[in-house]
Amino acid sequence: MTRRERREQMRQQQGRRPHAPATRHPRRIPGIWIGFGIIVVAVALLLGAQALGVFAPGAPPVDLKAARYDPQNEVIGSQLPDEGNAHIPAGQKATYGTTPPTSGSHWNQSGAAPVPWGIKDTTLPDEAIVHNLEHGGVVVFYKGLTADETSKLKDLVRVLTNNGFPKIVLEPYPQMQDARIALSAWRWQLKLPGHDDVQIVKFVRAHYDGPDAPERGVR
């Protein structure tokens, strides 16, 4: 075989060799989609934080020791007859001489009464919250308030509970007929036509853990 023939044979063999596969580069996600994804995640986080109340305005500062909140030398509310403090089985109904109640028979079973202190958005059984009154707490009832009035009342209750008066329950009370806000302590009650921070704070200061409560000092 001549030199020319060998070169021709080599060229033919090289032409039949398989080509190496082309390197495939991963598809790049356009930057605009990355930015869009970041925005979606950020919005979701903001909405979640808002739902948890992270951005809700805090309760306004209130000096509970200010002179205008001092109940000294005043009778705040009305003193009512003591209806006793008998314990009855959870679920059993009781009859009270006042609406809302200020004393009387009540549940005593763990998990049913007393109820946890704090702000409630549903009405609790009278037989449960009377046990809270027995412990020297104050229950604040409201009906027919505007959203703004309800917000102010809740803010004031937060200030009170965070500044030495933790034994407070706030709840809506649709069966109340002669007031829009009422406060009960054991044997004491104050009814108001609307939100009045001065009278509310005075009542709490005057009757919180008061001497009339059979189990004052108990949480």
Image: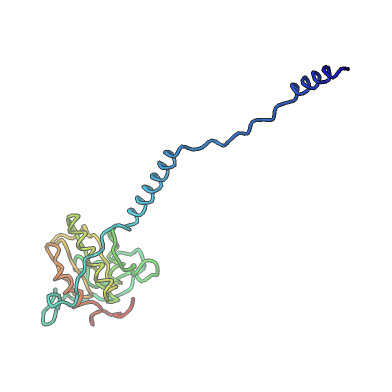
The color scheme shown is rainbow
Whole-percent x and y of residue 29? 49, 38
Q: Nearer the viewer, residue 90 or 24?
A: 24
Quadrant assignment for the C terminus: bottom left
**Above or below: residue 10 compared with residue 31:** above
**Above or below: residue 98 compared with residue 36:** below
Q: Nearer the viewer, residue 164 or 55?
A: 55
Q: Residue at x 46, y 37 (%)?
A: 30
Whole-percent x and y of residue 160? 24, 71
**Above or below: residue 214 compared with residue 57:** below
Q: Nearer the viewer, residue 21 or 150?
A: 21
**Drawn side of residue 29 relative to residue 149, left or right:** right
Residue 56 sits in quarter: bottom left
Q: Nearer the viewer, residue 184 or 102?
A: 184
Whole-percent x and y of residue 145? 17, 57
**Above or below: residue 219 compared with residue 194:** below
Quadrant assignment for the N terminus: top right
Residue 200 sits in quarter: bottom left
Whole-percent x and y of residue 85? 28, 75
**Drawn side of residue 128 relative to residue 78, left or right:** right
Q: Residue furthest front?
A: 3
**Drawn side of residue 182 relative to residue 40, left or right:** left
The number of callouts visible is 0
Q: Residue at x 14, y 71 (%)?
A: 199
**Drawn side of residue 139 relative to residue 89, left or right:** left
